[in-house]
Structures are given as structure tokens and as C-alpha cells.
Amino acid sequence: MQLWVIALLLAAVLGFFSRAVQTFVRSSFERRPALVLAVPFLLTGIFTGAARLAHAASWPLGVFVLAYTAAPVVCVYIAGVGVAKRPSAWDFVAVLLLWLPLEFAAGARFVPVPARGFLHSVAYGIAILLGLVLFLCFRSFPGLKYNPPQRAADLWLPLVGFAAVAPVLILLGIAIGFIPPPHWPNKSGTAMAAAAAVIFAGTALPEEILFRSLIQNLLMLRFGSGFRILLAASFIFGCAHLDNGPQPLPNWRYMILATVAGLAYGRVFVRASTVLSSTALHAMVDWTKHFFF
């Protein structure tokens, strides 16, 4: 049953690739902007249902999730509905309020240890879904590139990006002690194929929505699209990995590698017409690291 919850959240996130879905939600907000204030209650209800499945539901947890989902909604509601060409300070605050509580596992003390893995995945899905509702539909920022591939370059750009960045990441990763020398994978082809789908949908896509469609894109809309902005967005992406293992924390090795990888992901995102291109590159890098290092 828990897998069904994750699958439904993923289906909702993928559903926003439909232009019809985007248009419907966007037009609903344009007619009645106050509708967005109901979104935190809807998402909190979904999370509470998932918590009940995991025998982890409680009033403190429900109140915390409601506060977590309501805070960014209030920020964008203040900023206003409709097509926004230049992000305001409220938009950046909303992104931080979406990202940082998850990054630092805020609210974990309200969740029993056995349920934390499942509910963290649910919270991640809710955060990405909320980000799409707020920035793709309510604020309607251009450049999120949350659409299917639109040209042939969207398919070959990840391959070119991988050919360019993979040797750099491998040599640098070995040199600084982040990864060991490569080895042949000991998993079956079926397991490796299944892992590719999980990495793409469960790790690469959510992170690309957050760090490229939202953070990098909003920085570019506000400050321009030069290399300094790409570097800044990549550094933010790298810093987000400081609290990741397996090395001791803060994991500066992971930060360095993630920053370099972020430059490649960000460059592909700029050149492609869809976030799926940088997602594919991201998934290829993570999959290679998982099975060959």
C-alpha cells in the first residue's frame, strides 16, 4: 500500500507534463487566486493519510506539515497570481521554505524511526508537487521547461553531457578519495534496469525540478543567464550534498563533485527545451556511480 502512495504522488508530478493539466490549474487560479490557500490543507490530508498507513499519524506531525506547506503558499500569494517575468524576494523565500526543511530533516522528531524512510519520500513528493503548483501554475514563471522533449537535441544533449563530464567526475572523484577505482557491476541486468527507472523518477527528476527549473531558472530570470549565475546555482547544488554520506560530514568531497556535475546539468538545462534532458544526464551519472564505483 505504501508503494501505491508513492506511485500516486509520482503520477501527480508527471501529470503536470501535460499542457492541458497546466492550463486547467493555471486558469483556475486566475479566476480565483484564493484557491491556492486550500492547497496546504489538501496536501496535509494526503500526508496524514500516508502517515496513518505507516502508523505514524499524530497531531503535532499534522500541524507541522500544514505549517510547512502553508508557508511557501502564503509567500507566493503575497507575490500575486499570473505570469511573472522577474522573481520577487517572496519567490526566493518560498523556494527556501520548500527546500530547507526537507534538507535538514525538520520534523523528523515527530515520526517514528521505522516510518521515516517512507514518510520522507512522501514529503519529498509533496514538496515537488507544491513547487509545481506554485511556480508553474500560480506564478507561471517562464523557463521551467516542464514539458516533454520538443526537438532532437533534447535526446542527444544528455549523451554529449555525459561523455564530457563523466571522465572529469571519475578522475576528480578518485583523486580526492570520494570514489574507489571502477569495478564491474555485480547486479543482474534486470536489477540495473529497474534501478535506472527508480533513480530517474525518485532522485534525478525531483532534484532537477528543484535545482534547475526552480533555483537556477529563478536566478537567471532575476540576475541574467551568464556563467556566474550557472556557477552560483551549481554551487548551491553542491552545498546541498554536504550533509550526505558516506564520508564524514560535512562531506566536502561530495560537494565538490556535485558542484562540477551541477555545471553540466545546468548547461544541458539551458540548451535543452525540457528539464527531462538534464534529468536524464543526472540519472546517468548517479546510475554509473551506483553500479560501477
Image: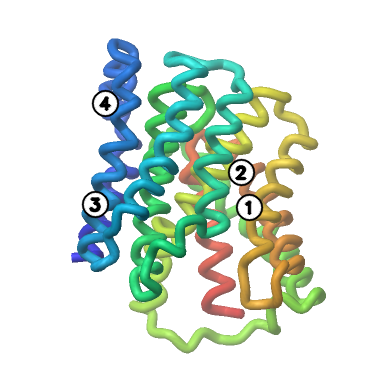
Mark 3 and mark 2: span between their CA atoms? Answer: 29 Å
Q: In this view, does 27 lie above or below 252?
A: above
What kind of residue is marked 2?
A: Val
Q: In this view, does 127 lie above or below 27?
A: below
Q: Residue 87: where, in percent of width, then height?
A: 60, 22
Does the residue at mark 1 contact the one at mark 2 (Cβ under 8 Å)? yes
Of the residues tagged 1 and 4, which is closer to the observer?
Answer: 4
* Count of all numbered marks drawn on residues in the image: 4
Residue at (22%, 54%) from the top-left corner?
A: 49
Mark 3 and mark 1: span between their CA atoms? Answer: 31 Å
Residue 95: which quarter of the image?
Answer: top right
Of the residues tagged 3 and 2, which is closer to the observer?
Answer: 3
What kind of residue is marked 4?
A: Ala
- Regarding mark 3 in the picture, which secondary structure is present there? helix
What kind of residue is marked 3?
A: Leu
Residue at (58%, 72%) from the top-left corner?
A: 289
- Regarding mark 1 in the picture, which secondary structure is present there? helix
Mark 1 and mark 2: span between their CA atoms? Answer: 7 Å
Q: Mark 3 points at which residue?
A: 8
Q: Residue 222: where, in percent of width, then height?
A: 67, 23
Residue at (63%, 52%) from the top-left corner?
A: 161
Does the residue at mark 1 contact the one at mark 4 (Cβ under 8 Å)? no
Q: Mark 1 points at which residue?
A: 161
Mark 1 and mark 4: span between their CA atoms? Answer: 31 Å
- Regarding mark 2 in the picture, which secondary structure is present there? helix
Q: Mark 4 points at which residue?
A: 20
What kind of residue is marked 1?
A: Gly
User: Which numbered marker is on residue 268?
Assistant: 2
Tell me the crowding category of disc 2: few under 14, some 14 to 19, or many 20 or more residues within 10 angstroms, Cα based: many
Residue at (56%, 55%) from the top-left corner?
A: 103
